[in-house]
Image (spheres, rainbow, N blue to C red):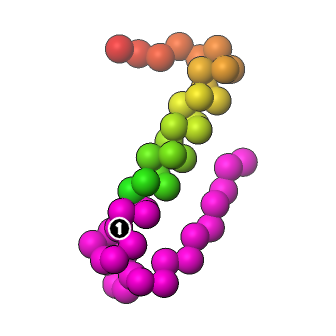
Amino acid sequence: TDVTETLLEQSYHVATLDHDAEQIFADSFAFVGRLAESVGREGAASGG
């Protein structure tokens, strides 16, 4: 299980459009990267 909780102190109703948007997108990109690496290590085929 890969879970990260982040407090977004500068965001309000729509966090992806507020002051913390850059952090949200960067953290999301890193999360997907970690998942993609773990799938590759388990031997799952990747499409292309």
Q: Is residue 36 left or right of residue 5?
A: left
> Which part of the image, by quadrant, shows the C terminus?
top left
Q: Position of residue 10 (x, y in %)?
A: 41, 83
Does 16 appear in magenta?
Answer: yes
Q: Is residue 7 magenta?
A: yes
Can you give x and y, in whole percent of width and height, for residue 17 in the image?
27, 72
Residue located beneath label 1 in the image: 21
* Residue 30 horizontal side relative to residue 44, left or right: left
Looking at the picture, does residue 30 appear above or below residue 18? Answer: above
Residue furthest left in the image = 17
Residue 13 vertical position relative to residue 45 in the rendered view, above or below = below
Residue 39: x %, y % from top left = 60, 26
- Above or below, comparing residue 45 to residue 8 in the picture: above
Give coordinates of residue 33: x percent, y percent: 51, 37
Find the magenta span and give its range: 1-24
Outermost residue toward the right? 1
Q: Amino acid at mark 1?
A: Ala
Q: Residues within 10 Å of mark 1 (few under 14, many from 20)?
A: some
Q: Nearer the viewer, residue 28 or 1?
A: 28
Q: Residue at x 39, y 82 (%)?
A: 11
> Horizontal placement of 46 versus 44: left or right?
left
Which image quadrant for residue 18? bottom left
Q: Is residue 17 above or below residue 29?
A: below
Quarter of the image where one finds residue 21: bottom left
Q: Secondary structure at mark 1?
A: helix
Provide the major secondary structure of the magenta segment: loop
